[in-house]
Image: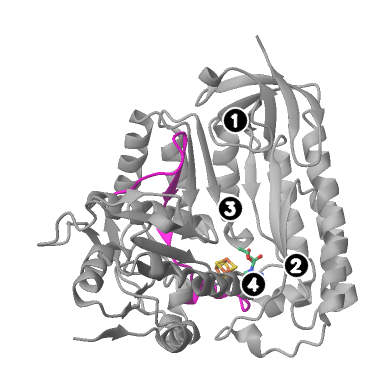
Amino acid sequence: MERINKPDLNIARKRTKYEVETTVYEDAKNIKDIGKNKKYMIQTHGCQANEADTEVIRGLLEGQGFLPTTVLEECDLIIINTCAIRENAENKVFGELGRLKSYKRINPNLIIAVAGCMPQEEDVVERIMKKYPHVDLVFGTHNIDKIIEYIDYVMKEHKQLIEVYSKQGDIVEHLPQVRENRFKAWVNIMFGCDEFCTYCIVPYTRGRERSRQKQYIIEEIQKLIEQGYKEITLLGQNVNSYGLDFVDEKYDFADLLDDLAKLDIPRIKFTTSHPKDFSDKLIDVIAKYDNIMPFIHLPVQSGSNSVLKKMNRKYTKEQYLNLVERIYNKIPNVSLTTDIIVAFPGETNEDFLETLDLVDKSKFEGAYTFIYSPRKGTPAASYKNDITPEEAKQRLYKLNELVNEGYLRGNKRFENKTVKVLVEGFSKTNETMLSGYTENNKLVNFEGDESLIGQIIEVYVEKAKTWSLDGRVVR
Ligand code: 5AD
Ligand code: SF4
């Protein structure tokens, strides 16, 4: 029996209103211990949504006895959890798939799987079928809960299995998870995106916006508190539209955050916010609670009204700056960061200067900056684009210079001050030092005893650099 079910962007684009159903995960029937004496590795690309998905995949695999490894030669199963947001992310995955082929000579039973956002694209699946026959399993973002059944099929039938749903499923609760970090946890509050910014593939790869019911979110966070977690990051492509899909309940993101902040969790943050839905009610909730971190990631994408319109962002530069001002007024200590795309089709030099002006006025303390990358199937992919790659790189370079000044300025604010740090472990760049993040999400390095790991402690900041702070533990 062949199992090939390819994606369809036309179906993925559709938004039909229906009430989202929540089901509870049940173990795959009649499949037991298929991972016994077997080892797996997952390579995760892209955003936190993928990192959170990887933790579910790990939970499902380890429930069947699979053990994690970091050694490719030992693997019985390799999963690449992919990102589709820009072309270079995809090229990396194809490169990696080519390299992985040789490991099948070491272990002929090795299963190679491609998961995540790339399988949701028609072209990608065609290319894998034509050029990468050594890929055994391809599945998308809507059917992660079925992975055990798929692996069982591939192990028994020795055939390629491609199963991608283009119409999003409902919400599956109580999926097992093996979390990467012991103190900081991701908690999805919603899935999908209905914004359809014209450059973006996410509404196609992650489907319609679906909010998790509040009781499941609270239940998950309460368990994390019991396990000693100190920081929760609430996840959604646009957390500000949380709850808009509820049929007979009026309960929005500000309400949810207000309820969650009352739980006994030292730190809560959230990502990502869409500026158009960022309400004053939400600003008030953030200002009200000490355990909501004064850190907001607020993607602006461009400072030019004409580009924002072509991007379908639904706000103007002036509205964005007004929102930023309201946030600074109510939460004076806040650190704002953003995402910016340069060289969107039709962006003139004047448009770009508007972006620089907005960055300057917004006093961002960090930004992810990108050169526009056309994504097949999105509206902007057919817009005329005559910006040369050299010009695009020049703009990115200029923007980054300004953005980096913001990183340093943001860090300098804390020089000669005492900050609270969640100690995560030894520094990645210097193993004799500890490191962790402040409430404003600033990285701090300091000397200290291993026993501090996992605690929130006070650190005096002696020096601010562009990318980190140097401090010493306050006795
Ligand atoms: N090209 C470049 N950057 C993109 N982003 C999303 N789609 C594209 C694209 N096609 C950026 C946006 C978004 C971030 C996650 O990735 O800035 O906020
Ligand atoms: Fe993409 Fe826009 Fe949705 Fe963000 S809000 S995921 S940029 S479509």
Q: Is residue 53 above or below residue 310?
A: above
Question: In this orientation, which residue lies closer to the viewer: 236 or 8?
Answer: 8
Location of residue 223 (image quadrant): top left
For residue 38, side relative to residue 463 (left or right)? left
Q: What kind of element bears circle 3? A: loop
Question: Disc 1 residue type?
Answer: Phe
Pointer 1: what residue?
426
Residue at image coords 62%, 76%: 87
Label 4 to label 2: alpha-carbon separation: 21 Å
| Segment colored magenta | 176-204
Location of residue 141 (image quadrant): bottom left
- Ligand 1 has an atom within 8 Å of the beta carbon of the residue at disc 2: no
Instruction: List x then y, in percent, for residue 443.
Output: 68, 36
Q: Which mark is residue 302?
A: 2
Please state which of the two labelled residues, at mark 4 or mark 2, is closer to the viewer.
4
Q: Which mark is residue 336?
A: none
Residue at image coords 53%, 67%: 83
Quarter that holds the C terminus? top right
Pointer 3: what residue?
279
Location of residue 320 (image quadrant): bottom right
Label 1 or label 4, whichever comes before in sequence order? 4
Label 3 or label 4, whichever comes before in sequence order? 4
Instruction: Report crowding for label 3: few under 14, some 14 to 19, many 20 or more residues within 10 A (C-alpha).
Output: some
Please state which of the two labelled residues, at mark 1 or mark 3, is closer to the viewer.
1
Question: Disc 3 residue type?
Answer: Ser
